[in-house]
Image (tube, rainbow, N blue to C red):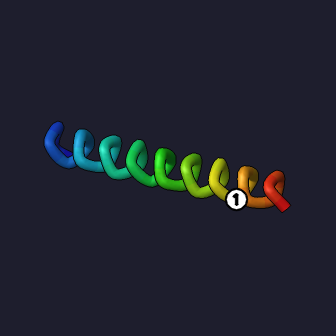
Amino acid sequence: MSKKGIRALVYVSLVSVAIWGATGYLVMEAVRAL
């Protein structure tokens, strides 16, 4: 793989982790609000 491909892969994985983290946080806040 090229460096650009690896960089894109790392970027996508970081973004997906951030999205999952934010989603999990929002779910926990919603559960706590109940």
* Residue 4 on image: x %, y %: 14, 42
Amino acid type, mark 1: Val
Nearest the viewer among 13 and 15 is 15
Crowding near the residue tagged with mark 1, few <14, some 14–19, many ≥20 C-alpha atoms within 10 Å: few
Which residue is label 1 attached to?
Answer: 27
Using the image, determine if residue 32 lies above or below residue 10: below
The residue positioned 34% from the left and 42% from the top of the image is 10
The residue positioned 41% from the left and 43% from the top of the image is 14
Using the image, determine if residue 23 lies above or below residue 1: below
* Residue 34 on image: x %, y %: 85, 62
In the displayed structure image, the side of residue 14 where residue 28 appears, left or right:
right
The residue positioned 23% from the left and 47% from the top of the image is 8
Nearest the viewer among 8 and 21 is 21
Using the image, determine if residue 26 lies above or below residue 3: below
In the displayed structure image, the side of residue 27 where residue 11 appears, left or right:
left
* Residue 9 on image: x %, y %: 31, 49
Which residue lies most toward the front here?
A: 33
In the displayed structure image, the side of residue 30 where residue 19 appears, left or right:
left
